[in-house]
Structures are given as C-alpha cells and as structure tokens.
Image (cartoon, grey):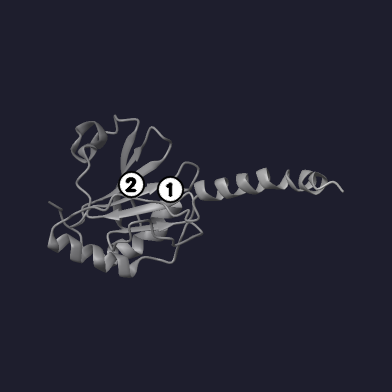
Amino acid sequence: MNFFRHRHTASPGLPVLAALIAIAGCSSADDSASVAVPSPDTKVTELCQNLDKALPRTVDGRRREDPEPRSVLTAGWGSPAIILRCGVERPPKMIDPKVAAGDDPRAAGGGVNGVDWLMEKQDDGTTRLTTASRLAYVQVTVPEGADASGVLVDLAASVKKAIPQGIAD
C-alpha cells in the first residue's frame, strides 16, 4: 500500500490554491475611484449640495458611481471615472493672460450650453475642466480618450440649475 501516491496527485492543487488565495487577498474587490474632497466655505457647500441633487445619472453614457470617500462635494461616472469635484479653489490658469489671449496650448476657455469652462490638458492625458463665472468652482476630470465635449453637454443643465452665475471667491 502506497500512501504517498494519493498525496502526490493532490499536491499540485495546493500551490494553485495558495496562489489563488494570495491573489484574491491582494486584489481589490472595490474598483471605485478615490478622490480628494474639497473643503469650501458654508455658502459654497450649500451650492454644491444643490448640484449633487441635480446631477444626471449618466454622463457620456457612463453610469454614476461616486468615488471614495463619499461626499456631496464629489461625484463620478464609469471606469475609468469621470470625476466631478465641487467647491475647488480657482485654478491659477483662470487668471493667466496667456489663456485669455489664446496663447496657451495646454489651456483654453469656452462655453457649452450656457456654462463657461476652463479646459486644461494634464500631463497624464486627462482633461481638467473648471467652471468659470459661477459662484462655486466645479472641476471635472475627464479620462484620456473620453469625449470632454459630451461630458460638458451632459453636465451643463445641472450646473446652470444649481450654481448661479457670478464670481466665486
């Protein structure tokens, strides 16, 4: 009687099982994005709460999947995520005369459906868009390859409804 014969046929399964457990332990079951939550004053926070309630369920065909940590100041859609942050600081490029004159190849201003935006190309290929002429700055980061103009069209009505025109700060 050979007791080792059965162990020999079962032993290849143990390393495979151990590897699967190790891989499962190292992988994330939660693929949601994470984002830094802004910390605006009370007035801007109220505007951002209104925006959160008005945001669409889908943007650029992507379903809403809010990033971690959950906050009324942030929202997200799809994966890779389109990320919205409300109540951010004014971007330095917003007051850069080169941008206003059209002399900055990485930043441009423009409007979509009644909402003005500053568009900035980032080194990682994403596009960062920030509202202008509104009482709160809303920043949207669009992943490389996504249609930034479609994102702005989808968000314009919510921004117009929740964030009044004016100068933030």
Above or below, comparing residue 123 to residue 160 in the picture: above
Judging depth in this view, the residue of 95 and 100 nearest the camera is 95
- Residue 80: mark in rendering: none
Circles 1 and 2 in contact, beta carbons < 8 Å:
yes
Amino acid type, label 2: Leu
Q: Give the number of callouts.
A: 2
Seen at 45% across and 53% down, the residue is 150
Above or below, comparing residue 7 to residue 113 in the picture: above
Judging depth in this view, the residue of 85 and 116 nearest the camera is 85
Neighbor class of circle 1 (other Cα within 10 Å; few <14, some 14-19, many 20+) is many
Above or below, comparing residue 157 to residue 4 in the picture: below
Amino acid type, label 1: Ala
Report the side of 17 relative to 126 (left or right): right
Residue hosting label 1: 148
**Mark-to-mark CA distance, 1 and 2:** 9 Å
The x and y percentages for residue 53 are: 31, 70
The x and y percentages for residue 92 are: 20, 38
Seen at 24% across and 62% down, the residue is 48
Helix, strand, or loop for circle 1? helix
Helix, strand, or loop for circle 2? strand
The x and y percentages for residue 57 are: 43, 66
Residue hosting label 2: 129
Q: Earlier in the sequence, mark 1 or mark 2?
A: 2
The x and y percentages for residue 11 are: 73, 44
Seen at 18% across and 38% down, the residue is 95
